[in-house]
Amino acid sequence: MSTEQIPALRLENIVKTFPGVRALDGVSFTVMPGEVHALMGENGAGKSTLMKVLGGIHQPNEGQIFIEEQPTVMNSPLDAKAKGVVFIHQELSLADELPVAENVYLGELPRKSFGRVDWSKLHADTDEILKRLNVGFGPKDLVGDLSIANKQMVEIARALTVDAKAVIFDEPTASLTDAEKSVLFEVIEDLKSRGVGIVYISHRMEEIFRISDRVSVLRDGQYRGTLETADTNEDEVTQLMIGRSLDLSRNVQHGELGAVALEVRNLSCGNLYQDISFQVREGEVVGFYGLVGAGRTEIAETLFGLRDPTAGTILLDGKETTIHSPIDAIGAGISLVPEDRKGQGLVLGMNCRDNMTLPQVDDMTAGPFVSDGAEVAIFDQYRDKLEIKTPGWKQLVGNLSGGNQQKIVIGKWLSMHPRVLIVDEPTRGIDVGSKSEIHKLIRELAGQGYAVIVISSEMPEVLHVSDRIIAMFHGRITRTFTSDEVTEDNLVQAISGITPEQGAA
């Protein structure tokens, strides 16, 4: 066997069981030097467990790991890194109180005589890596002062400190802007050119088809097949993942709309957005689409009382409403499913029932105690209504899949019976099957008479669920489209600040 034919990494017949669960059932997976091998599957399919076995966090019950065809046992994450397998985790594992350089080389600081840290070498080596990543921060900057996207780049910098044979990226673009994604893809191309094998885990089909060479799919802990990316399509990959095709068509439903539930007139908030006016009717889904920084989330935060506007008027059912806090918003009938469901929408260490009833605990007290029966009744109602997959209300929310976590957040706010439901990035970090369920749920909520606002960075999503789409650019509304007049071209032009006249020229 020639050097070129030796896999950088090979897992053979990996089995991993937990009490009552067979998380991996004889999974095999191979990564060649210089290839990007995408690993896909629904939440709970076994992807994370497989990577934890590879990274030494879990020991397999059966099976074998090979590095360049040498049998290997991974005893810990540090052991895995020493053997050339590096992880870029979706969940950041940084020390906010330390500078960038010390995070990048954490546990591996260069030393001089008598064990002293070689600070000059540390900063020089880190600076060289950061220049490869083309970032706007330096080795001495405090990690806690960086944005989420820049923290992700620090995680990526860690992978470049060793002579890696394989690098595993787990949802690496979840917090990155388009410009930062381009830098990441350049880094991946650089690693490929050096003969490094890349495992790329993502729910984003467009990324998979942009950068991967092969796609392997897991379902229910079992290996379902490997496809050459150039020879397959989204529908074939989806069928392997979930066992069925998805409806990816645009929304063309034109149900009867009710009265205007929410109206915003000339709303402004400093430099974040200016002169915003729009309406949302009962039974309507209005999508907001734009680039990062366009002001979409800031408008939602204003409507939910997290920001005070500097000008403008908010009307609910035709009556002017003043909102200074989330309590005001909830009282007025506005609910917000936030972009960061784990950081802002859920308490991961609490159970499903307590998360769902958290905003209305005060209304369910009997003396000094909360009524368990009332809480369970609410949970049962919305578990059934939203088809939340969980063994029961006692399950910790942190143990649920991303799609079911999102349904818990939606159920929490639906139980408050809002007039207006705002959903910011409804399917971020959610697998394709759960995405379809969330999209269907949004349309069903509109059919039940809710006025729904959806903010999304994914064009197919906003096209699929919206009755109207509001395009934003640099804090202003550029155009509003109905579902039957919007095209991908005129939507891209609108969020880029190009007028219809300029686009036609």
Image: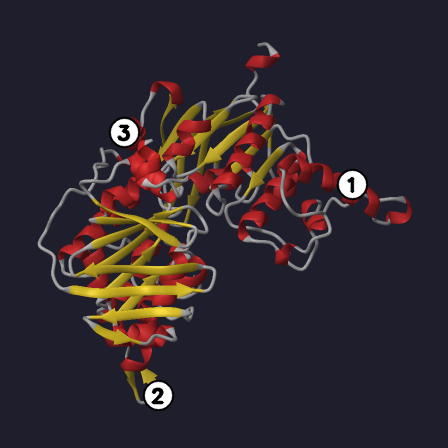
What residue is shown with label 1?
124
Q: Which residue is drawn at 30% across and 37% down?
A: 490
Say the numbered circle drawn on residue 67.
none
Can residue 220 be seen in this snapshot?
Answer: no
Q: Residue 189 lies in what quarter of the image? A: top right
Badge 3 element: helix
**Residue in the foreground of this view, choosing between 312 and 238:** 312
Please, what is the three-letter code of the amino acid marked with disc 1? Ala
Instruction: Tell me the quarter of the image containing the C terminus.
Output: top left
In three-dimensional space, the C-alpha distance between marks 2 and 1, rounded to whole angstroms, equals: 60 Å
The N terminus lies in which quarter of the figure? top right
User: Image check: 350 left or right of 74?
Assistant: left
The residue sitting at the right extreme is 113
Residue at which label 3 appears: 235
Q: Quick check: marks 2 and 3 in contact, CB under 8 Å?
A: no
The answer to which of marks 2 and 3 sits earlier in the sequence is: 3
In the image, what residue type sits under mark 2? Pro
Q: Is residue 62 left or right of residue 183?
A: left
Give the image quarter of residue 346. Answer: bottom left
Instruction: Please tell me the numbered disc located at residue 368.
Output: 2
Q: Which of 89 and 441 is in front in this view?
A: 441
Tell me how far mark 3 sits from mark 1, CA to CA: 47 Å
